[in-house]
Image: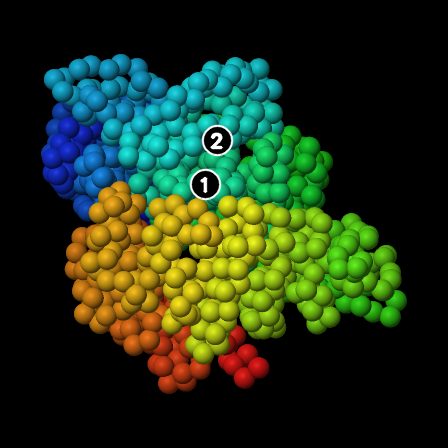
Amino acid sequence: METLTREEALERSANVIPDEIDVYIDLSNAKSGEEAFFSKSTIRFETKSSSVFVDLVAKSVEEVRVNGAPANYEVTDTRVLVKDLPTDSPVSLEIESHCYYSTTGEGLHRYIDPEDGATYLYTQFEPTDARRAWACFDQPDLKLRWQFSVKAPSDWIILSNQPEQSRNAVGELAEVTFKRTPPLSSYITAVVAGPYARVDGGTWSGGAADGGHANISLGVYCRASLAQYLDAEDVLTVTRQGLDFYHEHYGFTYPWGKYDQVFVPEYNLGAMENPGCVTFNEKMISRDTPTRAARQSRANVIFHEMCHMWFGDLVTPRWWDDLWLKESFADNQGSMGLTENTQFDTEWATFASGRKEWAYKQDQLPTTHPIAADIPDVEAAKNNFDGITYAKGAAVLKQLVAYVGKEAFFTGAREYFKKHAFGATRMQDFLEALEEASGRDNLQGWAKAWLETTGPSTLRIRRGKDGFILEQHSMDAITGQEALRPHRVNVGFYELTGDNLVRVGIEEVTLTGSSLPLETAGNYDLVLANDDDLTYALVELDENEVTTALRFVSTIANPTSRAVLWSALWAGVRAAKINPRDYVNAVASQVPFEEDDAVAGDLIGNALEALLYYMATPERKLEANSFANYAINAIGRSDAEDRKREWALAATRALNIAGSPGEDQMQFLHDLAAANSPLLTVGPNLAWRARITLAALGAITREDVKAYLKTDPSGEAEVFALQAISALPGRIERQKTWTRILEEDLANEKMSAMLAGLNAGSLGHGATGFAGDFFDLAAHYWDSHTIGMGRRFIAGAYPSVIDAGSPEEAAALRYMASWWVSANENAPVALVRLMREAADNLERSFRIQTKWLTK
């Protein structure tokens, strides 16, 4: 499919002066199973060129008119090229088409709830899938004022970015017209329709320093069959806190009218910042009682998306090169806002243990890129919604706040919004606002060091004769050149007091070169660079500090300091400097004393990753079995239901990795599967996790899974059941699943569940693998599916578990991975990137396993 390039977008921007657009869609056939819906766009603009292309991916184009007359046009698979346009005068361009309903999460997605048969629709467009639902200029800098009209069943909830303007009955249908938006990019337009359940959140009233005032109606929505589990008051409390925070700091009153938040099924992302109609992955609504960690994670996403109402929606990156201008800011501000204005005041610790680890991993891959990346086309943009653009950028912004000061940062942001409201910007625009606010004229150098280089810095403390020296090692991963960065950091000094690791001193320094002598001297048990996590850098410990940290990390009082030290240990594991077994044992022994539930969950996840990827099979199975026992025992020792559930999930995964559970372990799994455990309260989702593990172990049958599904006929259970059936280790069952994945037109979530099931089952002895098939079929699957489905297929089907203890099998897998990359250099860039990353992860696993194979 033809992709939009940066050059084409720039040329169109130079020629087109956008005004407004009317979109009409007829969804009256959505429940009938028809594959397409009627869509009409009326675009008003002026142009300097007599030929302009409009983006559209449609089943058919029925009519194109210019100023009411038939147009001269050509249709390709992604565009309508309109010719002979009048120049330098108003143009009204009408395009009528039929566009496909989607099951891939791209465009207008349709979901049929298996529990009650209800039909649900929602749109998801970023970066350029608005063209799948209506004709438009599908690039971020061409902002129009949009007015949507939707025909749909009259008993449905029908939403868009703005409040309703009018509603007319047409038999059993309704035609709803919404108020026109302020200037808005196409990728954040939205329509949601279906029998959604609604919770009225009342009105938030307030304003900002610009003197404005807003009465913002709040609504929370989800599928009707999920409504009993929707903890709407928690969502609304966080929403109000977010509106308070951003109005206090941004100085620009919310301009989008209302604030609806809709939890939708089969969603490819966590959430999307459509102004006035924010969509969220409904997995954030737990059918089990939501844990504090889950609520904190959801609150972070709420704050993240709300930040976008200003960073991204009000002021938008001109092109996807500056994607960080919205995503890095939202990640950073979400964590800051949560810490300062909600009950989740340890969010920066969670950021250090979770989001930031995502960034470090991404930044150490061969496909790393600068935060301010070079994005030549939309296909490249889709792969840059990654840990660098989000979490590394957020961490670097935290360093920027430390560098210029918090007050100057927000003063600059307020001026940025005021000057560029409803416009599109580049990085330079924000830096200029910040330079003026902070009085610093050297931010261009800061930006070059941080935003235009690749790879993480590494900070270490060297103990010299005369004291401590803070050192940084920074090498640009692409150029191979030294890339020293300015680091404003705190260095913490720790002593063992009894069985507690206590910070007894701290030194605030700015490191600009390769090393800096510290003023503090003494004999300390541990010296922690980047204490309080102010900068973006890996931290390297010496051998004695590793030993101390593995035993006493949980005794440090400050949660962010603990998270930084855990991060240093995990970096050591991934660098093959710390034995993964030692790390897993530290998690088992230390995490029961970790006070922060979200951090504890991240650490348990790291331990499971170490077991699965960084240990060869004999040790993997032995240590996973031991970790499962730790987890089961921890359930019994814990008084907190949240932590019990975290350990129970860990135990089910560890037992899947270990295989061949003992009698007591098997009873534990069966108790969970029956939702009747003496150790903890078991909700439906946890029960299904246990059933998937039992299926992978061959301990239950397809008929057993179907029987469980009869007792829980929900949409969530349908996906869990698919995963469980796909996990069955029998050769015939696995081949059937693989064939379905390759040949059937599966919905996005269902395909991912089936692949996850195959992976769970592949850990068993003698299970059939599909590595050979995968490498032969990867390019064909990618070419014959949307990029969203292609990404899911590569993520789920790639044979990512290697066993260095079986040299011949490991050599064969490494050869296939390397061969594919070298033999497919001309494959689509996005696919090659994913395959290179997966091959690199495979090699890292092999290196780590080989290092410790005989230890």
Q: Residue at x 66, y 65 (%)?
A: 550
Category of crowding for the residue at label 1, using alpha-carbon neighbours closer than 10 angstroms: few (below 14), some (14–19), many (at least 20): some
Q: Residue furthest front?
A: 678
Residue mark closest to the camera, 2 vs 1: 1
Q: Position of residue 55 (x, y in %)?
A: 26, 39
Category of crowding for the residue at label 2, using alpha-carbon neighbours closer than 10 angstroms: few (below 14), some (14–19), many (at least 20): few
**Quick one: 480 or 785, which is closer to the camera?**
785
Give me the C-alpha separation between circle 2 and circle 1: 11 Å
Q: Position of residue 114 (x, y in %)?
A: 21, 41
What colour-coding does the image apply?
Answer: rainbow
User: Circles 2 and 1: CB distance less than 8 Å?
Assistant: yes
- Please state, as top left, top right, bottom left or bottom right, where the C terminus lies in the image: bottom right
Q: Position of residue 485 (x, y in %)?
A: 66, 56
Indicate which disc, 2 or 1, sits on the residue closer to the N terminus: 2
Side of 606 where 541 appears, left or right: right
Q: Residue at x 57, y 20 (%)?
A: 208
The amino acid at mark 1 is: Pro
Residue 194: image quadrant is top left
Side of 485 where 330 appears, left or right: left
**Quick one: 137 or 581, which is closer to the camera?**
581
**Quick one: 3 or 564, which is closer to the camera?**
564
The residue that mark 1 highlights is 290
The amino acid at mark 2 is: Asp
Residue 809: image quadrant is bottom left
Q: Residue at x 20, y 21 (%)?
A: 154
Q: Position of residue 626 (x, y in %)?
A: 51, 69
Q: Secondary structure at mark 1?
A: loop
Residue 67: image quadrant is top left
The residue that mark 2 highlights is 234
**Quick one: 799 or 599, which is closer to the camera?**
599
